[in-house]
Image: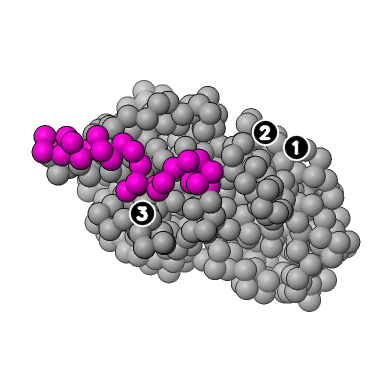
Amino acid sequence: MKSFKKGVLYISLLLAAIGCNPDNDVITSTESKLTPTEKLYMKVNSFAYDNMQSYYLWTDFLPSKENSKTSPFDYFETLKYKKYDRWSWITDDYEALIKGFDGIEKSMGYSLQLYWRDASQTEIVAVIKIVYPNTPAAEAGLKRGDVITKINNAPLVESNYQDLLGLDVATVTYGTRYKDNNGASQIADKGTVSLTSREITVFPILYPQVKDTLGHKIGYFMFDQFSASYNHQLDTTFAMFNRAGITDLILDLRYNPGGYGSVANFMASSIAPTSVAKGKKLLVTFKYNTELAQYFSLNGMKDRLEEYFTDTVQNNMNLQTLYVLTTSGTASASELLICGLQPYMNVVLVGDTTHGKYTGSVTLQPEVYKNNQWVLDEAIKNWAIQPIIMKYANALGKTEFINGFAPDIYVDDYLYAPIGSAQDPMYAAAFKAITGSNPLGAKSARMGQQEQSIGSISGKAPILSDGLLVVDKFKRH
């Protein structure tokens, strides 16, 4: 990657990402007037701008460079092309960023959906969407559908809920939702639990199962994040499905915000018709800014411009139809999987419209060119940017689906039913599409939340909360 960066910067007529740019003369001349924080901020901002100029998909829309001493978080926002870019960001914790990509982070171990408690829109309640195994939340006995009403005995309101839900140590008051005689939603208290966050590793493959019924063998699992370290476990899951002889697959991506593109390729190649995987058909093409595209083309780097199905997966399932459970939290690498498979098989979406992210990003750290090599700039090495550098299209040219993919079968996500159970309306709707019958005890597919949603917050994977496709070929760590 460093040789690639060097080439790009030479094409850009830049001498280096940080230390060798001509604006350093200006920075040096004013150093005596700057505080240490201002000096640091100027260095970070210079790194951010130079790399955005070289890599950013919308580099033509960057403002002119300035020697800004404002907060890098504020400065970076001025660089983004707001018309299209909802996803690029900067961080001052590179280590946490990389751990987050692999599902490792300090967390309580739950993901929450937020609602107004009642029509007055004064108090907020947090309904648990999912509790991850072997986490503080799981050990405390919390489960999907539990409703958090207070933290440290304080009700959640608009001015405090983010701070309270972000505490590392908290006493959580929770209850269960029910309907009173007038059909109004009420919450019955269940008690309190004490939680202390810790670093956890979230295993992304959840609730795998095979159901043999009505002449079908239906495989199901939830995939929570396209983490780079779990292809072997994915392959083990697909091997289990192949041994069981499944005829149909329900892939639950309802909360999957994205991750590594290579994992999406691995999964697509495991699911697609064998002729597609073995034939190494085109999965997606990538479009970069003009300079990057020319560099890749002139240097014969076809793999940067096109991605193909792989013929090396051990357990291809040779499916003709795939059922995918989706919500607005289904994003990026999840959407690449859907988009990439659509030209080759029937992809049935069950749930709600996806996020609408057709772009990919790369992690860039601050480096300086010394002694004929790129090395980390020790003064600001904890900083990194995650800029959007490309957009993708499938084999039919489908791209820029900014409004997401609409479901073929609309179903609300009912948080009070166990995921992947007969009572889960999303699972039940996919089951019915396959078999023609509802699973025993299934609720109506249109049954959903009655409360007014105000958004969501995650006790895990905040790095990916807004959707991310990581271009792992560009990783430099």
Give the residue at mark 1: 398
- Pick whichever, 98 or 247, lies toward us: 98
User: In the rendered structure, are the residues bearing label 2 and label 1 in contact, judged by CB atoms less than 8 Å apart?
Assistant: yes
Seen at 82% across and 71% down, the residue is 245
Which mark, by number, is residue 368? 3
Seen at 61% across and 50% down, the residue is 333
Check the image and tell me how it is coloured: one colour
Residue 446 rendering spot, x and y as whole percentages: 67, 36
Please report the bounds of the magenta region as a residue range: 8-34
User: Mark 2: which secondary structure?
Assistant: loop
Give the residue at mark 2: 401
Q: Is residue 32 left or right of residue 25?
A: left
Q: Is residue 382 left or right of residue 441?
A: left
Res. 72 in view: no
* Residue 52 located within the stretch drawn in magenta: no
Tell me: residue 129, above or below residue 67: below
Seen at 62% across and 46% down, the residue is 295
